[in-house]
Image: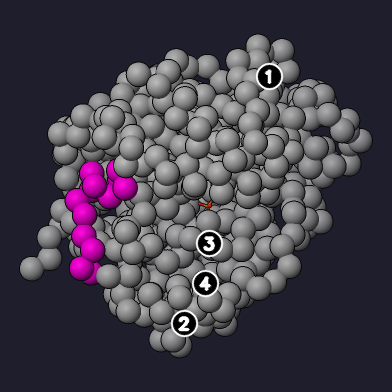
Amino acid sequence: MKDKFLFQSTRSSEIVASAPEAILSGIAPDGGLFVPVELPRADVRRILSLDPLPMAAAILHIMLPSFSEEQLLPLVTNGYTGKFDTPAVTPLCAVDDMNILELFHGPTCAFKDVALCLLPHLMKASAESLSDRNEILILTATSGDTGKAALEGFRDVEGTSILVFYPRDGVSAVQKAQMVSQQGSNTHVCSVEGNFDDAQTGVKTAFQALQKEFLSQGVRLSSANSINIGRLAPQVFYYFSAYRDLMDAGKIAYGDLVDYSVPTGNFGDILAGYYAKLLGLPIGRLICASNANNVLTDFLKDGTYDRCRPFYTTYSPSMDILVSSNLERLLYLLSNDTALVSSLMKDLSEKGRYTVPASLLKQLQQVFWPDCCDDEQTLETIHHVWKDCGYLLDPHTAVAWRAAEHYRDQFGTARETVVLSTASPFKFPEAVLSALGIPHAENGFIAMHELSKAVSMPIPAPLQGLEDKPVLHRDTIAPKDLTEYVRKKAVEYR
Ligand SMILES: *Cc1c(COP(=O)(O)O)cnc(C)c1O
């Protein structure tokens, strides 16, 4: 009999874990990702009737049934209150005949905050429910944005601490300023000589070297990686909240199908939308929007995922990805076939490509519709939406807006469309100013002020005055010294 409290690996139904175990371990021991063994359908009408925080707790309970709604509500409340600048958490904004779901009201002005403000609380509750008294120490290598969002999420959460490593030569001045000014008694930031790969390799090595040793001393090493089920589950919420807001605005009645357009990189955000659909939310199409790194567009068109292709650095850097890890969960959900998923993932790592069976492709295409655009088209979209609608899009959101427009042009749908907005335009002032045809400074801090003046909008509070904030973290190390560094720092935390 299936156990609704259990999770299993996408690559083997023999490898199972409870929600707390899955959250604490992140990836499954066979390299697969944890998925619920059985997903109950939700009481969608009841969920839609709830206020934002209880709604988030109710959905999390369905995704992570070992935790009760009563247990989750205080975690959600602690995670979001005071960190998001609006009680709605993720407000919906009508722009022309589109609806923008603003996911950037958190402490770093980007959508990863929604999950990363909750993950530390879920980890703590997981450890408690397993009577695991270890301190949790998060080790993360970052190419910029995720590190800052993780630092903000874990900041001052009791029983946890976080060490973030960034490549000295690989983050922007603004990203660096955000990290080195990080406050919190349990946060630490250090730069690594070299690029992102050097930092990531260093962190992986430290993990392997220290995991057992630390556990014997009462410290559990963990990561805030985007494949953790504890990061995916919190993202299902805003698909429901947007639907509810459309009902409240009188634009839809309960049961009407709504399309969602999602700027996609690692496939986590859009997969949460698929979970929302599985739970029973009336979702029509999920529009999978990519930039010039359009590996997903090709895959959803012809069924072959091929990572052997040029890599482009674009104006929407958080979508510059050639391997979308969370896609593995979708392949499992659609096929229910761990042997198939294992063999596809083996093909991906050995040959750099795989092809799904025709029947699976057909299933994919019934729900997902792919589209992509290049940098020039991204800027054009920012320009025209600002000129025609007076709404300022960030480059990631612009990619999704354009895909939504294409979908409508092609299918002439009368359904409401929700465009997920994953970042504040002030995080990417240079690109946005270029889109508006305004010359800008090379310096990101100055460009932020120039953008603020040009559009008569204030810089969001978390990004304000960054250049003047005191530097609290100055350490720089060579990659080979990373393990020793973690060992030394871990002592300071205890
Ligand atoms: C991470 C990120 C994305 C992509 O989300 P995935 O879940 O990786 O698909 C899109 N936009 C922004 C601004 C992001 O930070």
Above or below, comparing residue 416 to residue 298 in the picture? above
How far across and how far down the image is residue 223, in percent? 42, 42
Q: Is mark 3 within 8 Å of ligand 1?
A: yes
Mark 2 neighbour density, 10 Å: few (under 14) some (14–19) many (20 or more): some
Residue at the spot of label 3: 324
In the image, taking residue 307 as reference, residue 350 lies left or right, namely left
Residue at the spot of label 4: 349
Three-letter code for the amino acid on which mark 1 is drawn: Leu
* Secondary structure of residue under mark 2: loop
Which mark is on residue 353?
none
Q: Residue at x 55, y 44 (%)?
A: 202
Q: Is mark 2 within 8 Å of ligand 1?
A: no
Q: Nearer the viewer, residue 350 or 254?
A: 350
Which mark is on residue 466?
1
* Secondary structure of residue under mark 1: helix
**Does the magenta run of residues contain 357?**
no
Q: Which residues are magenta?
A: 13-25
Three-letter code for the amino acid on which mark 3 is drawn: Ser
In the image, taking residue 479 as reference, residue 367 lies left or right, namely left
* Secondary structure of residue under mark 4: helix
How far across and how far down the image is residue 286, in percent? 48, 63
In the rendered image, the quadrant that contains the N terminus is bottom left
Decide which of tag 4 and tag 2 comes sooner along the chain.
4
Q: Residue at x 35, y 18 (%)?
A: 494
